[in-house]
Image (cartoon, rainbow, N blue to C red):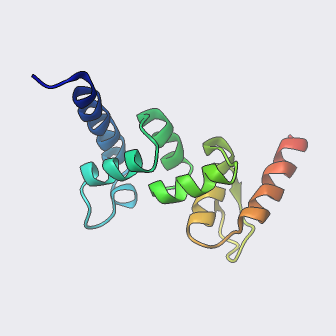
Amino acid sequence: MPDRDDRERTEALGDIGEVIRRYGPAASGSATSAETMAQEWIDAGFDDAEEIEDWLRAGCVSAAGAQMLERAGITPQQAAFRTKAGRTNREESIGSKIVNGELSIDEARRIITNEFWNS
């Protein structure tokens, strides 16, 4: 009989995999299954499907990218702010721009601070 931890892990993998499938190839990678990507999110310390969906919605499509942003003190809601700042003037989310190397963490913090104080 499987123990409770195995059932919870299997359920979390399924829930996270479903979220990843909803966001399509950008979230699941071209050659990687949703289940493999779900395991990467869990390995990075993210086991809540709703939180992962917040990161994906913010344009942060990799567990490593979300982990980097979280360690920098940037929340999914902040990462979702849209900006034209950075290496390209195309409007994208802060999370997407950071993960793609178009925006530095320091510049993102300035944008987030400005958004907070001027909203």
In the picture, measured across the screen, residue 80 lies left or right of residue 107, that is left
Indicate whether 114 appears above or below 1: below
Give the residue furthest to the right.
117
Instruction: Answer left or right for 78 relative to 33.
Output: right
The residue at the point 84 percent across, 42 percent down is 116
Image quadrant in which you'd find residue 87: bottom right
On screen, residue 50 versus residue 13, left or right, reads: right
For the C terminus, the quadrant is top right
Question: Can I make out residue 59 in this image?
Answer: no
Q: Position of residue 86 (x, y in %)?
A: 72, 72
Give the total of numbered labels.
Answer: 0
State the residue in front, 12 or 26. Answer: 12
Q: Is residue 13 visible?
A: yes
Q: Residue at x 62, y 54 (%)?
A: 69
Camera-side residue of 82 and 3: 3
Residue drawn at x 28%, y 34% is 9
In the rendered structure, the answer to whether residue 108 lies left or right of residue 15 reads right
Does residue 13 lie above or below 6 as drawn? below
Q: Where is the N terminus found, in terms of image quarters? A: top left
Q: Residue at x 57, y 61 (%)?
A: 96
Q: In the image, residue 106 lies at what x, y percent?
A: 78, 64
